[in-house]
Image (cartoon, grey):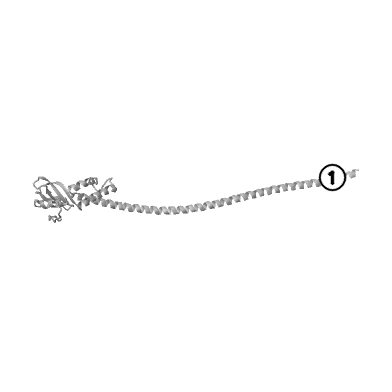
């Protein structure tokens, strides 16, 4: 009986050993399988993450390419704009320089005209001098140092004086003036100006007459009472008191 039990126990022990070894192998296999599964999961996750990152990088790349293209376009436009601005700035600078030169030339010309007009005004008859006196007063004392007076303020004065003098110089003018005789007395006379070239005068009684003409020191007067009838005839024709047109000889002065 004991002999039968021993083989059975030995078989059980052997079986237990075999089963134990099998269980260990199963556990080992399970562990390996679990690690393999975990590894595959990690790989799958990494691959999925990589795919997402790759797509994100591709999108970012395209976006950056678009932004770079737009930036290059803007830089090109900016360069063109800067070039155009430089060209425009150069043109405006040149125009300003030309304008400054022209202004300086006009300023010098106006000053020269003011000097000439002031000298010419000394030759104006009293009536003409009174007409332009307000304009002369507005002119600078020193034309080449006008102070705050602008060209826009100065030029109209010169033009006004020249125009007024020009009109006076191209027409006849009948005026009443007081002249000083050679004896120092004064007399009221009728004066007929032939522009600013010469003027003839005669008194109301047709007894005192003469002529005057401009000089560098003003108008010079010459008494010629024998001209009284002729001067009166000139004035009468000018005033249309004599309907007949006649040739009347009177003296003149050539300078």
The residue identified by callout 1 is 12
Estimate the x, y position of residue 38 in percent, counting from the top left. Answer: 69, 47
How many dots with numbers?
Answer: 1
Estimate the x, y position of residue 183 in percent, counting from the top left. Answer: 8, 46
**Callout 1 crowding tier (Cα within 10 Å): few <14, some 14–19, many ≥20:** few
Say whether residue 35 is left or right of residue 214.
right
Estimate the x, y position of residue 185 in percent, counting from the top left. Answer: 9, 45
Rendered-image quadrant of the N terminus = top right
Say whether residue 150 is left or right of residue 8.
left
Say whether residue 24 is left or right of residue 109.
right
Estimate the x, y position of residue 157 in percent, counting from the top left. Answer: 25, 48
Q: Nearer the viewer, residue 46 or 82?
A: 82
Secondary structure, mark 1, is helix
Q: Nearer the viewer, residue 39 or 193?
A: 193
Residue at 72% in and 48% down: 33
In this view, the residue farthest toward the right is 1
Q: Nearer the viewer, residue 12 or 91?
A: 91
Asked if residue 22 shows in the view, the reply is yes
Asked if residue 199 shows in the view, the reply is no
Residue at 51% in and 53% down: 69
Rendered image quadrant of residue 20: top right
Rendered-image quadrant of the C terminus = bottom left
């Amino acid at each position: 009986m004991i002999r039968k039990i021993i083989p059975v126990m030995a078989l059980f022990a052997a079986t237990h050993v075999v089963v134990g070894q099998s269980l260990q192998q199963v556990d080992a296999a399970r562990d390996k399988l679990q690690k393999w599964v975990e590894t595959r999961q990690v790989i799958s996750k990494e691959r999925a993450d990589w795919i997402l990152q790759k797509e994100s990088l591709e999108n970012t790349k395209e976006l950056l390419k678009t932004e770079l293209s737009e930036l290059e376009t803007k830089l090109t436009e900016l360069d063109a704009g800067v070039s155009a601005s430089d060209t425009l700035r150069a043109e405006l600078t040149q125009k300003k320089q030309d304008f400054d030169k022209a202004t300086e030339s006009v300023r010098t010309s106006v000053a020269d005209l003011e000097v000439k007009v002031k000298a010419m005004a000394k030759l104006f008859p009293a009536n003409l001098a009174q007409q332009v006196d307000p304009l002369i007063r507005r002119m600078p004392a020193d034309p080449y140092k006008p102070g705050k007076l602008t060209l826009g303020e100065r030029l109209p004065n010169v033009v006004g004086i020249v125009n007024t003098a020009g009109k006076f110089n191209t027409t006849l003018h009948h005026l009443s003036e007081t002249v000083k005789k050679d004896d120092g007395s004064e007399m009221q006379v009728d004066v007929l100006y032939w522009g600013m070239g010469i003027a003839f005068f005669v008194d109301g009684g047709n007894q005192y007459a003469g002529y005057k003409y401009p000089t560098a020191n003003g108008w010079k007067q010459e008494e010629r009472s024998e001209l009284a009838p002729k001067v009166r005839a000139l004035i009468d024709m000018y005033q249309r008191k004599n309907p007949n047109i006649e040739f009347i000889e009177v003296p003149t002065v050539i300078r």
